[in-house]
Amino acid sequence: MLSNNQNAISDFNYDDESLNIDDLESSFEEALKLQLSDLSTLEEEMEKIGDPENLGEVISDEIWNQFSNQIGLDITSETLIQKYDREHLNEKYEDISKSIMQDERYIKANANMKEKHNNGELVDTYTGKLMDANDKPNLDHVVSRKELYDNVRRKQANINTQDLANKKENLAPTNESLNKSKKEKSINQYIKEKKIEKSL
């Protein structure tokens, strides 16, 4: 074994001239810059995700990105929207809204939320606080049913509203008061209105 290692070492030709310290240092600096730029991007994303004002936007963007990537969606195509509207002429928001709430995924997530609440383990997604036993929990659609129903990208992709509305990432336990006051508003719109109310 020792002779094999000695042979490998003797076969290795080390050329001082081929090793350029400046090139090596330059390539390390480039790699370091790339890593640091990735880190700064991650830090920016962390700030966005941690900011309640951006939470809904981040989740909405991620949901749309996932669906767009899965089907290679051409977002600029108006004909897809027109086709969707023709194929769903009798579709009414009220009917879709009810079917979202009756969807098996929503019912299951709601039951899971209630079980966590009964066990004293339910955390309000928007406040980050453990919900009290006296609090009445509601399962909120982070991106509202109305926003999803009206969304042009959803129509272009011919995706039904129930699938988007009841994705795990779009269901958030919160207290009933907050959920009822939010109604069909986007998170950003709701926060802006609350800030205006507070400033009056």
Image (spheres, rainbow, N blue to C red):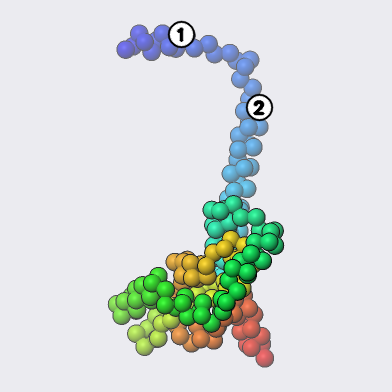
User: Does residue 39 appear in this view?
Assistant: yes
Q: Residues within 10 Å of mark 1 (few under 14, many from 20)?
A: few
Asked if residue 189 is positioned above or below residue 39 in the image, the reply reads: below
Q: Nearer the viewer, residue 65 or 135?
A: 65
Amino acid type, residue under disc 2 in the picture: Asp
SS for callout 2: helix
Quarter of the image with the C terminus is bottom right
Residue under numbered circle 2: 23
Residue 94 x, y percent position in the rendering: 53, 82
Q: Nearer the viewer, residue 34 or 153?
A: 153
SS for callout 1: helix
Asked if residue 44 is positioned above or below residue 109 in the image, the reply reads: above
Q: Residue at x 64, y 88 (%)?
A: 197
Classify residue 76 as left or right of residue 48.
right
Q: Residue at x 59, y 52 (%)?
A: 72
Q: Residue at x 51, y 80 (%)?
A: 95
Q: Residue at x 35, y 8 (%)?
A: 3
In terms of image quadrants, where is residue 111?
bottom left
Q: Residues within 10 Å of mark 2 (few under 14, many from 20)?
A: few
In terms of image quadrants, where is residue 143?
bottom right
Q: How many marks?
A: 2
Residue 158 x, y percent position in the rendering: 57, 63
User: Does residue 53 appear in this view?
Assistant: no
Residue under numbered circle 1: 10
Residues at marks 2 and 1, CA–CA distance in whole angstroms: 26 Å
Residue 188 x, y percent position in the rendering: 62, 75
Asked if residue 119 is positioned above or below residue 177 in the image, the reply reads: above
Amino acid type, residue under disc 1 in the picture: Ser
Quarter of the image with the N terminus is top left
Mark with earlier residue (2, 1) = 1
Classify residue 49 as left or right of residue 22.
left
